[in-house]
């Protein structure tokens, strides 16, 4: 839920480093100095403002929250204008695979963010759902993420289920928790896994040096992905993945962990493979992670009967496969 901004929201405030804060981290120093000037400006909020480029020194943005400050430095902090506490309804085209009075199944396109967050305050799936469902959706699962049971990354396409009432939301959430809800993905990966079928059982947690990334780490949460090679090519493969757990970026992290990262993944690395002609160019230049949520299966919260939904690969992944098949 959006937190109300301070009384100076929409203005520019200045913070001069004083002896008492010398050698503090920048985020801590600004928190201390601005405490008397700006209300409700927490250290976490300052870290977010730093990341968004809202803090500058001598006219140049400073984003490093851990930077050591020096006496006499004068930082400018731009406080964005206040935003609505609740997401706004925005009419947008949705590819609805199924809908009844309890839930929707949507084929999410590439580029659509699921719920509002810093940097993506509108034109999200939540904004579209509020316009499609009206006030009946408000508050289900939380005011900032109404109806959302699970999520897909912005550049991952495919099926996502949305609850339209509290009973459905609770039932679907339980199925995610007990792993009875089944999700199947297809990915185009670098290289061909030696084992045609297998599982990656490796704990996932926040990367210790890059908080925007996840990684396989001993203190992470239990994470299990089952995979199967559906088709192999020269230097690449089409792989089916089934999630047994639901960690952030799980498939992308696990496939990178076994040295077969998803083609086009901008975060978890690319494996360089020598190919020829158009196939090489298409694989190296694929503009997003080649990952698509193909199937969803769960128990309908009202009928208590299993339901299954499937969708085709989007045009960009289908086109890449076509080029790879020509090289076989």
Image (cartoon, rainbow, N blue to C red):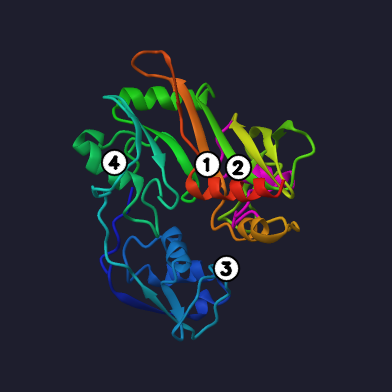
Residue 122's x, y, as percent? 31, 54
**Which residue reaches farthest left?**
135
Q: Which is nearer the N-term, disc 4 or disc 1?
A: 4
Q: Mark 1 touching mark 3, by CB under 8 A? A: no
**Circle nearer the N terminus (4, 2):** 4
Look at mark 2 in the image and give the residue it sits on: 187
Q: Of 131 and 33, which appears nearest the observer? A: 131
Pointer 3: what residue? 66
Where is residue 75, by image quadrant? bottom left
Q: Residue at 59% across / 53% down in the picture?
A: 213
Check the image and report above or below for 40 versus 149: below
Q: Which mark is residue 21?
A: none
Magenta stretch holds residue 322: no
- Type of secondary structure dominating the magenta stretch: loop
Q: Are marks 4 and 3 in contact (CB under 8 Å)?
A: no
Q: Nearer the viewer, mark 1 or mark 3?
A: 1
Question: How many neighbours does mark 4 have within 10 angstroms: few (below 14), some (14-19), or many (20 or more)?
Answer: many
Disc 4 to disc 1, how far (Cα)? 21 Å
82 lies left or right of 161: left
Give the residue at mark 1. Answer: 292
Task: Give how far across and how far down residue 89 sits, in percent.
Answer: 23, 47
* Cα separation between marks 4 and 2: 27 Å
Mark 2 lies on a secondary structure that is strand
Please name whichever residue, 325 or 227, is drawn nearer the observer in this view of the structure: 325
Tell me the SS state at disc 3: loop
Cα distance between the residues tagged 1 and 3: 37 Å
> Which residue is at the far front?
326
State which region is magenta. 245-268
Task: Work out whether mark 1 precedes mark 3 in sequence or the reverse, and give the earlier one.
Answer: 3
Give the quarter of the figure containing the C terminus: top right
Residue 129, labelled with which disc? 4
């Amino acid at each position: 839920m959006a937190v109300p901004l301070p009384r100076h929201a929409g203005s520019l405030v200045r913070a001069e480093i004083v002896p008492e804060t010398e050698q503090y981290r920048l985020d801590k120093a600004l928190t201390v100095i601005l405490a008397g000037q700006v209300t409700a400006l927490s250290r976490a909020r300052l870290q977010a403002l730093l990341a968004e480029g809202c803090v500058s020194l001598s006219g140049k943005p400073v984003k490093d929250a851990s930077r050591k400050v020096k006496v006499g430095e004068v930082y400018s902090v731009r406080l964005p204008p206040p935003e609505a506490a609740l997401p706004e309804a925005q009419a947008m085209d949705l590819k609805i695979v199924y809908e009844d009075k309890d839930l929707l199944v949507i084929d999410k396109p590439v580029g659509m963010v699921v719920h509002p967050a810093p940097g993506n305050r509108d034109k999200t799936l939540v904004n579209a759902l509020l316009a499609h469902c009206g006030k009946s959706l408000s508050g289900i699962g939380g005011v900032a993420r109404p109806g959302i049971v699970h999520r897909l990354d912005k550049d991952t396409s495919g099926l996502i289920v949305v609850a339209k009432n509290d009973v459905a939301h609770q039932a679907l959430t339980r199925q995610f928790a007990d792993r009875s809800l089944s999700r199947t993905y297809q990915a185009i990966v670098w290289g061909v896994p030696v084992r045609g079928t297998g599982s990656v059982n490796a704990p996932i947690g926040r990367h210790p040096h890059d908080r925007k990334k996840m990684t396989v780490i001993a203190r992470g949460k239990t994470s299990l992905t089952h995979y199967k090679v559906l088709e192999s090519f020269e230097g690449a493969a089409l792989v089916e993945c089934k999630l047994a757990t639901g960690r952030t970026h799980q498939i992308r992290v696990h496939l990178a962990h076994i040295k077969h990262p998803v083609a086009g993944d901008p975060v978890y690395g690319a494996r360089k493979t020598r190919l020829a002609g158009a196939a090489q160019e298409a694989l190296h230049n694929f503009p997003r992670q080649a990952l698509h949520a193909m199937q969803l299966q769960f128990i309908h919260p009202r009928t208590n009967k299993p339901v299954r939904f499937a969708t085709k690969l989007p045009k960009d992944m289908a086109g890449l496969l076509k080029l790879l098949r020509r090289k076989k």
